[in-house]
Amino acid sequence: MLTKRYINIKLLALSVSMLMFIGITTLSAGPKEDLLKQYNTATELYNKGVYLSAYNLFQSILPKAKEIKSNIEPEIQGYLTLISIESGHPAMEANYRTMEENYSESSMITLVRFSYAGKLFDNESYNKSIVIFEKLDPSHLDSKYKNEFYFKLGYAFFKTGNTNMALDYMNKAADGPFDGFTNIATYYLAHTYYL
């Protein structure tokens, strides 16, 4: 009889332990699931071009991602950086530096570098854009950005007086798949050879 009671107590203790474990697991999964849901909403907003709302949502979930050491923390910072670059936000440079210093292994670093260098290029900061463009490995760029990369890097070299490097990159843009940068690269090649 004692053994039956002992077994019942053990089973009860085991049941309580299992319920507590399930409860703790559910609680610990809850914040992660909520974070992922908010992250997905923010990326949808970003993809639709609703940058301010996406930025605010990413900004609000970043501390939570850091707190629970989520593996999407680098992506959240990446999107914050991309939005600040695309919108010309005053935090653009600080966000870029944070990305380089803390998340240089992120899957988004190539796109962040490309976007930041492109913004510097658009603002005619050619020397600075060259430094960032040269950190890129073009093989990691999406193919739709390669000609733009080669053209902008070539043009930046052209504007800073390095015609040999300019010709090298302009040739790559001109020889790439036809897009909006192919003809303009060909034009600048001819112009550079003429000089």
Image (cartoon, helix red, strand yellow):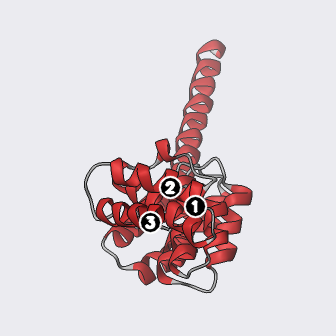
Which amino acid type is marked by label 3?
A: Tyr
Camera sees residue 33: no
Q: Distance from label 1 to label 3 (Cα)?
A: 12 Å
Which amino acid type is marked by label 2?
A: Leu
Q: Relative to 20, is 132 above or below?
A: below
Which mark is on residue 163?
Answer: 1
122 vs 5, left or right, is left
Residue that sits furthest to the left in the current view: 178
Q: Which residue is mark 2?
A: 167
Among the two numbered marks 2 and 3 on one chain, the one whose residue lies closer to the N terminus: 2
Residue that sits furthest to the front in the current view: 194
Which mark is on residue 194?
Answer: 3
Q: Residues within 10 Å of mark 2 (few under 14, many from 20)?
A: many
Across and down, in percent, residue 21 comes to 58, 39
In this view, the residue in front, 157 or 112, is: 157
- Kindly check if marks 2 and 1 are in contact, taking CB atoms under 8 A apart as contact: yes
For numbered disc 2, what is the local secondary structure? helix
Tell me which residue sits at (61%, 35%) in the image: 17
Q: Distance from label 2 to label 3 (Cα)?
A: 12 Å
Across and down, in percent, residue 89 comes to 56, 85
